[in-house]
Amino acid sequence: MKIVFTPDWFLGADIFIELFSFAILSLFFILSIKNYKMSRNKNSFFLGVGFLLIAFAEIFTILTKLVLYYDTSFTQQVGQMIVTYNIVKSVDIFYYIGFFLHKFFTLMGLYIIYKIPSKKGTAEDFVLVVFFIILSSLFSNIFFYIFHITALLMIGLIISSYREVYRKNKSKNTNLLVISFGLLALSHIIFIMSNLNVLYVIGQSIQLVSYIILLVLIIRITKHGKKKKPQ
Amino acid sequence: MERKRSHNNIIADMLLIIQEKGGKIKPTHLMYKANLSHGQMKLYIEELLKNQLILKNSNSIEITKKGRDFNSKYIQMKEFEKTFGL
């Protein structure tokens, strides 16, 4: 069974995209926490936590892929030994744990971001959702598309929430946020069919564009405070 | 109905008014423009002075660099909250 769908010529480029995503998500986390310190708005804090969890998810996938792509000498060396089977098996477990954590933290982060704007849930609801997120992440190791379908569903709900926010505030920044999440949703639709290498690359590229838009959003928000100063 | 302004909102409003007036304003003008009573104005001015966000001269109030920075961060915070509907 395939663990990753990255074509050989794209190895490394996908890690670069994930590093870039990690940087943007970390910036959003910092911005949210700075905001929370000033406003004491708990939603701001939870938004930061949501972005931080997805940033963690990116780190797990980066670390796992780095070992998978570049640690070939180790696997070649043990390949000639009798103990090969057990060690390779333990390496497999490492990959599965790495990708499981990537999926789990991504879905948890998306769920927290989805919950923020208006809704409030009980602790029991939260436990139930965490259980289903764990199930989805575990089953994704067998059927990879389950993760993308779950992520797509959550991103769809996030888009719906922010479209409602946009309807009320008509802010260009909220519109950018909706576009960015829209592209992220599109990338997950493409990832569902990513057993075709070309589609995997297209999905990753769309994800990169989505994170570039989020970077533009960060710049617009931080510049907003400065442009109001008199000349 | 308009919501009651929060403490931070009033501080930010006062600083923004001073900044929009070129960084300097007469106390009475500030009181009217910020829509404050004399008692409230006195309390807020004391707080702004204590936090070094303004300087008080004989007949005017001046915003400090720290005050301008506070304003900038406050506007940024409001934009962030508006963007995410927080």
Image (cartoon, coloured by chain):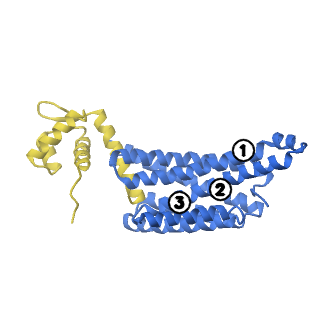
Chain colours: A blue, B yellow
Residue shown at 33% from the left, 38% from the top:
B69
- Tell me which chain the residue with mark 3 is part of: A
Residue A178 location in percent, x, y?
A: 50, 63
Q: Residues within 10 Å of mark 2 (few under 14, many from 20)?
A: many
- Tell me which chain the residue with mark 2 is part of: A
Q: Nearer the viewer, residue A60 or A179?
A: A60
Q: Amino acid at mark 1?
A: Leu
Q: Are marks 3 and 2 in contact (CB under 8 Å)?
A: no
Residue shown at 40% from the left, 53% from the top:
A44
Instruction: Say which of marks 3 and 2 sits in front.
Output: 2
Res. B43 image quadrant: top left
Q: Which residue is mark 2?
A: A100
Q: Quadrant of the C terminus of chain A?
A: top left
In primary-sequence order, the first of circles 2 and 1 is 1
Q: Is residue B49 above or below residue A101?
A: above
Label placed on residue A66: 1
Q: Are marks 3 and 1 in contact (CB under 8 Å)?
A: no
- Tell me which chain the residue with mark 1 is part of: A
Label placed on residue A110: 3
